[in-house]
Amino acid sequence: MIMLCRKEDVRLMYDMGLDALRLSISWSRLIPSGRGPVNLKGLRFYKNLIQELKTHGIEPQVTLHHNDLPQALEDEYGGWINRKIIGDFTAFGDVCFKEFGNAVKFWSTINEPNIVAWVGYDLGSGPPSHCSPPFGMVNCSKGNSSTEPYIALHNMLLAHASTARLYKQKYKASVIHTYISMVP
């Protein structure tokens, strides 16, 4: 995934004839501790990027989670293997819908949750590097490959459902032609 940070990048996309861009909003950039105050610089960055895309006729398609869980939540309670993540993820979605919802029609909650669970909690080759022998591909110092991938995926599905429900109940009526999904 590319990181756009300049108006010139958007102009190049426009010149290439792109009419849509799928991007993710980094939870850690927007809310560094995973919950609590919003980082105003991060908020400004995404608002400016989305506005620049819209100005050039490029439709932003936003993913809320692309394997970038705030480390603070992993450290505090284990991230996706703890049900507390459902409320925190839904609250993150609420911030995004409130701040960017007037400009974004297409939302995805979690990118490839099956891959996040597999590589992060079974193989241990992706964040947060949980695994156990004989399944892990790396040094398996923490985790349980027999249970954690399923717990993490289950919690991701519940977080998706909670966030989609919030969107439909609180935001969808005020926006025309919206779509929220989970990227398989």
Image (cartoon, rainbow, N blue to C red):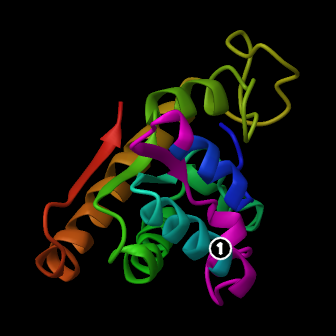
In the rendered image, residue 22 lying in the magenta stretch gets the answer: yes
| Residue at 56%, 34% in the rendered image | 116
Q: Position of residue 108 (x, y in %)?
A: 37, 50
Tell me the quadrant of the picture where the C terminus can be found.
Answer: top left
Q: Find disc 1 in the rendering and name its residue.
A: 30
- Residue that extends furthest to the top in the rendered view of this protein: 134
Give the crowd class for mark 1: few <14, some 14-19, many >=20 residues within 10 Å.
Answer: many
Tell me the quadrant of the picture where the N terminus can be found.
Answer: top right
Q: Nearer the viewer, residue 171 or 123?
A: 171
In the rendered image, residue 96 lying in the magenta stretch gets the answer: no
Q: Is residue 60 visible?
A: no
Q: Position of residue 119 (x, y in %)?
A: 63, 25
Q: Is residue 157 left or right of residue 3?
A: left
From this view, report whether residue 47 is shown above or below residue 155.
Answer: below
| Residue at 63%, 79% in the rendered image | 43
- The residue range painted magenta reads 15-43
Q: Position of residue 24 (x, y in %)?
A: 55, 52
Indicate the quadrant where residue 159 lies. bottom left
Q: Nearer the viewer, residue 99 or 66?
A: 99
Q: Identity of the amino acid at label 1?
A: Leu
Q: Nearer the viewer, residue 23 or 82?
A: 23
Please state the total of marks drawn on the protein image: 1
SS label for mark 1 = helix
Q: Is residue 162 visible?
A: yes
From this view, report whether residue 113 is shown above or below residue 174.
Answer: above
Q: Position of residue 89 (x, y in %)?
A: 48, 66
From this view, report whether residue 92 is shown above or below residue 63.
Answer: below
| Residue at 61%, 80% in the rendered image | 35
